[in-house]
Image (cartoon, rainbow, N blue to C red):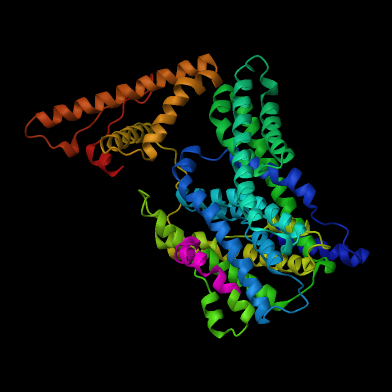
């Protein structure tokens, strides 16, 4: 709806002034609009759910993005050699790889807007949204690597430069994450001492989260990763230290700013589409791009095998054969389907085919791809105008067609929806108990799996970070709450032991009387319900 409004406004301005006066400025987007959305997403990201699915999120965001970018760029170059793309599109392999990188940016703004309206289940939402958030960081880093190759000239790029590109990719990604975590520690430590100056608590939150973004950008690191992990890392300690009024202020201010930024972005995308100077049209480029980004995201099958059979171009055959060994190792295990096949071998809760359909269909492109393509230097990238027009078409197709049809698709597939229900105290206690049980199982089996390392992290957090970053009164409350959890678990175990020793009783109908919190009512809990949880 907002994009359509932008189209109308852009048309009115164009008719009135005979030229397009308002456009989405990439600098404005990356410095002001994107940080408000990333900051809101990172700070209010459900940390437990995010880290429980971190392996899947990183796999889709890193491996999936690299796969999509490489395959899209490579196949577009193949289409150019075959004559499907017009000769007017003056682009070589490096230009198409650069375009493949930027067009692989799944937009968190569009994904958040669509999936919040659809209300899919929490696990599916966190995987798709987390992937779109980290995908942008990977895309921007990959974009900068390819820009350096284009500026150097494809003929001047040596083998060592590719290794430098990989090293740069890792440094920028890891460095941005570390910067964000450092600012998270600083933010938590500062809010520990703001008890007498509550009025400036929200200011510290906004300022330091944004400084994490700017600092990473200053050192040419991943600003998106920095801001995301700053928000995720600081939330627990900041929310415990600041007052209820400050928490309310932070929440609604961030949500309001993010909504305003989303509105501005979508409207300006619509306005930019009316600018005739950006429309250098090539049907082959647009059609191939739409097909490739959808196919490679969904199934990860390498279509070049069919092209190779019908091609008689010696240069193209040589190019494909050169990449054959590398591609053959990954072609069957890439894309959403291939990656999910691998992930399900390690996940406790596997992702079924319906989840894979929704994830494939949720690859919406948006302002990130548009801002990156506008930043291209037309002197070095001759086909910039064609890339801009193609990006606009891709954005409109994915946001409007896929965005509008994903809700009926989710209903038709009967995808489980979110319940928006807070867990009861019994559920929280038993969830913690199950965590400890799984940790014990891993220790007995001699494995150092996810639960083992999470238990190690919780011990480190309890012994060091919480003491450093939480106010003393808050830390004592957490110790009191932990003691009540232990008492509840001990009482539950003792009742079960007594039931097991008594004869003639039905253990499935036994009630466990658990303490919810100090001064609260006791609550009945049957063993039958316990088994279902």
What is the span of residues highlighted in magenta in the rendered image? Answer: 319-337
Q: Is residue 330 highlighted in magenta?
A: yes
Question: Is 228 placed above or below 237 here?
Answer: below
Identify the residue at horizontal 34%, vertical 33% (top origin): 426
Q: Quadrant of the N terminus?
A: bottom right
Quadrant hosting residue 282:
bottom right
416 and 79: which is toward the camera:
79
Residue 486 is situated, as x and y percent measured from the top left of the image, at 32, 23
- Where is residue 299? Give x, y as percent: 48, 67
Q: Position of residue 20 (x, y in %)?
A: 87, 62
User: Is 431 in the magenta?
Assistant: no
- Of the pair 128 and 144, the residue shown nearer to us: 144
Which residue does the image show at 57% across and 57% down from the upper left? 65
Residue 418 can be seen, yes or no:
no
Q: Give coordinates of residue 352: x percent, y percent.
A: 39, 59
Q: Nearer the viewer, residue 307 or 477?
A: 307
């Amino acid at each position: 709806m907002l994009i359509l409004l932008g189209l109308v406004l852009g048309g009115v301005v164009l008719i009135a002034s005979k030229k397009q006066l308002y456009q989405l400025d990439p600098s404005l987007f990356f410095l002001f609009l994107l940080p408000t959305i990333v900051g809101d997403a990172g700070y209010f990201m459900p940390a437990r759910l995010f880290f429980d699915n971190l392996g899947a999120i990183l796999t889709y965001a890193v491996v999936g993005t690299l796969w999509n970018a490489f395959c899209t760029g490579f196949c577009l170059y193949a289409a150019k050699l075959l004559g499907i793309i017009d000769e007017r599109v003056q682009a070589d392999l490096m230009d198409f790889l650069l375009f493949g990188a930027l067009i692989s940016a799944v937009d968190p703004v569009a994904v958040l807007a669509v999936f919040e309206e659809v209300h899919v289940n929490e696990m599916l939402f966190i995987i798709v949204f987390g992937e779109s958030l980290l995908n942008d960081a990977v895309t921007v880093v990959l974009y900068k690597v390819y820009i350096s190759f284009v500026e150097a000239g494809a003929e001047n790029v040596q083998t060592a430069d590719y290794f430098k590109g990989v090293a740069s990719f890792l440094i920028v990604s890891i460095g941005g994450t570390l910067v964000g975590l450092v600012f998270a520690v600083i933010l938590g430590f500062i809010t520990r001492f703001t008890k007498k100056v509550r009025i400036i608590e929200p200011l510290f939150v906004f300022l330091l989260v944004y400084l994490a973004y700017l600092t990473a950008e200053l050192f040419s690191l991943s600003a998106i990763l920095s801001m995301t992990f700053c928000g995720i890392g600081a939330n627990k300690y900041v929310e415990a230290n600041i007052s209820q009024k400050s928490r309310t202020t932070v929440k609604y201010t961030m949500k309001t700013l993010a909504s305003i930024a989303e509105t501005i972005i979508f409207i300006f995308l619509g306005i930019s589409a009316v600018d005739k100077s950006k429309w250098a049209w090539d049907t082959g480029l647009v059609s191939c791009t739409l097909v490739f980004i959808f196919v490679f995201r969904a199934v990860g099958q390498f279509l070049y095998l069919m092209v190779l059979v019908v091609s008689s171009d010696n240069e193209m055959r040589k190019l494909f054969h050169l990449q054959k060994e590398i591609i053959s190792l990954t072609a069957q295990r890439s894309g959403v389907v291939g990656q999910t096949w691998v992930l399900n071998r390690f996940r406790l809760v596997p992702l079924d085919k319906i989840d894979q359909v929704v994830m494939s269909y949720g690859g919406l492109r948006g302002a990130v791809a548009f801002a990156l393509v506008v930043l291209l230097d037309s002197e070095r990238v001759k086909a910039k105008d064609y890339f801009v027009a193609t990006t606009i078409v891709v954005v409109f197709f994915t946001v409007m067609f896929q965005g509008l049809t994903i809700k009926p698709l989710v209903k038709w597939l009967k995808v489980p929806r979110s319940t928006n229900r807070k867990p009861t105290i019994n559920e929280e206690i038993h969830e913690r108990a199950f965590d400890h049980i799984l940790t014990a199982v891993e220790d007995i089996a001699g494995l150092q799996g996810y639960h083992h390392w999470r238990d190690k992290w919780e011990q480190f957090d309890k012994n060091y970070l919480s003491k450093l970053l939480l106010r003393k009164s808050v830390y004592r409350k957490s110790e009191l709450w932990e003691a009540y959890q232990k008492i509840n678990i001990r009482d539950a175990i003792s009742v079960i032991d007594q039931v097991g020793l008594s004869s003639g009783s039905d253990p499935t109908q036994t009630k466990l009387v658990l303490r919810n919190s100090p001064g609260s009512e006791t609550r009945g809990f049957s063993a039958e319900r316990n088994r279902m949880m």
